[in-house]
Amino acid sequence: MNKFLMKQSFFALLLVGLVFQLPTEKVYAEEEKRMVVVYENEQGEKTVEASDAAIEEQYEHLSAAAIAADTATIDKLKSDPDIKYVEPDSRIKIAESGDTQPDETVVSDQWNLAAIGAPAAWHDGLTGKGVKIAIMDSGIAAHEDLQVAGGISTVDYTESFEDDEGHGTHVAGIIGAKHDEKGTDGIAPDADLFAVKVLDGTGEGYLSDLLEGIDWAISNDMDIINLSMGTADESNALEEAMQKAYQAGILLVAASGNEGAGYPVDYPAAYEPVIAVSATDSENNIAAFSSVGEKVEFSAPGANIKSTLPGSGYGIMSGTSQATSHVSALLAILKQQFPADTNEQLRVRLQQYTKDLGQEARDQLYGYGLIQYPAPVQDEKLLPNDSEGSMSGDTGDEVKEDRVTAGELRILATKLEMTLDELADLFAAHGFDLYNYQNLDEVNEVIYQNINGVSVHFLLEKAGLAREQLDQQLAAEALTLDDFNTLEELSAYINELEQHIENGENQLGTPEGNDEEGDTIQDISLNDDLTEGNSVHVPVESDPAEKENIDSGAVQQIDESNRATDEIIFTYKSAGKANPEEQQGKQLPDTASTIGNLFAAGGMLAAAGLVLYMRNRRTKFRSR
């Protein structure tokens, strides 16, 4: 081989090597997606570990992992019977509710403290001492009015839980600012504040970051978790995390949302284990920005609230975030006062520490009412029957003054296939206080013996009928519940109504127990039916807005025409939407695509060969 051919060969090989180092135009590889996988069992966890997914985070107390994986891997996990579900590791975000107003006025200007009676608690020596509160937010900044007991950062870019956004510091000051006659006073100044930084300096983070924070709170035996954030969309993984934390004995307090009336309560506040908080103003009216609805459990001051800011300053913010902080702080006060109470018992006890401002009993604006210390004196809604309920046996001894225990009520609620809150709400809706009875016999009398809204509810549930159907039939016959002498008569009437509805008929007989043809309707004992193994199914109330499941069943959307989104946006103001540009695939080097490389290399070699051939031809022509 002559020198000229050797040079040509070397030049061609050099070009081939360069081809494999250069990016190929319009060659794309699928971007791996951040997801959260929830296991069905231990085998499911092993399945994830053995998959092609990159595991970003695994949790100690949550049966879940945060992963990065391609579509094929995700689909494979979804179809695995040991995987409960896979959902997007959605972005979470804080959206500002407006410019923070600097404020350097004296402590006495804090109207919110007087509104909930905080000074009375301090007078009684209650300051939240020894109660551990995890503030899941943007962190807590160093401030002369704040003492941080510890914390964690779950965001990727820093291990510091220092607040670089401002919101978390404001929330922390409402709960636990020192009483040093500077700037602001916290409601529970001796509570132990823990900064759990789940959001970055722009107020953004991932669902997996929040899950890690909840997992940390369980591991570190927190008493209360303050969640001054929210989202319009549901997450199965987040709901399970809330349940795990509640089962671990932690009180969960979250903002109802700042979208105003007409929008449902945000998540996680809308989940059953979580206390949902609406916001009031200085006139004790519901703030215009506050989201409200049937999930609201309590209300608290949230308009123009002064608190701490990064940089040793103070400022005013408004939102259900601020209202949430008040509830967390008062729960810390009650936890100190009643240290033996469980989280469930404290949640129930807080109902007594409210001022009823809306409709009687629980309503969709204030919930049970505006939180208040000390507990306002409540009028008895149902006096016990002295001849039957105040004596035990034939001895004439008075029963002990202790109220029925929360444990007994939970057992009763479980038997009725209800949560304790649902049973309490049912009683309250008809003017009864479930927690104001001395024993279960008095509670059962309301349910099984007398004609009232509660007993009618269970009769209708047993028959599978709605209250509207009963009311319509009674109106058609010019009857009311007062026309029935016993619960057995009403039970027979409802059973006959059920049969007539099934047969497509409309009219019933009289409440005396006779149908239209004069046949006697057999009495049916409600007490026997409900207490001897025939449980009554009481469905959990559904969310007021329609929901639809997205593929994988992981995220549910509310009001799909206006609020549909591929990611969950947590905010103390409103839910934002994802930037679609962030979801596009990225252009990768040609080494990510073997087929693309081969085509590109072939093209380059052909071009190089053509150049060498023409050069050789010109050389030979010149030599002639």
Image (spheres, rainbow, N blue to C red):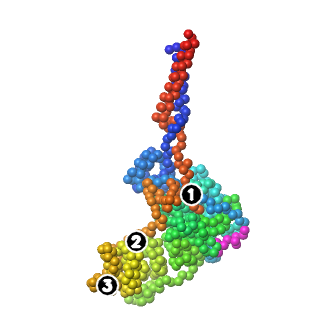
Task: Decide if residue 416 is on the left or right side of residue 620.
Answer: left
Q: Is residue 397 magenta?
A: no
Tally the numbered discs. 3
What residue is shown with label 1? 576
Q: How far apart are marks 2 and 1 (CA)?
A: 35 Å
What residue sits 50% from the left and 69% below the top?
Answer: 295
Q: What stretch is highlighted in magenta?
A: 105-114
Q: Residue furthest top?
A: 624
Q: How far apart are marks 3 and 2 (CA)?
A: 27 Å
Residue 286: image location, x then y, percent: 59, 72
Task: Decide if residue 17 is on the left or right side of residue 451.
Answer: right
Circle 3/circle 2 CB separation < 8 Å: no
Query: From this viewpoint, is residue 611 visible?
Result: yes
Residue 474: image location, x then y, percent: 38, 81
Q: Which of 500 and 239 is in front in this view?
A: 500
Instruction: Tell me if mark 1 has few (under 14), some (14-19) or many (20+) residues whose alpha carbon lies within 10 angstroms of its own.
Output: many
What residue is shown with label 3? 513
Task: Name which of mark 2 and mark 1 comes first in the sequence.
Answer: 2
Task: Decide if residue 380 is on the left or right side of residue 303.
Answer: left
What residue is shown with label 2? 538
Quadrant position of residue 484: bottom left
Specify the amino acid type for callout 2.
Answer: Val
Q: Nearer the viewer, residue 10 or 410?
A: 10
Task: Name which of mark 3 and mark 2 comes first in the sequence.
Answer: 3
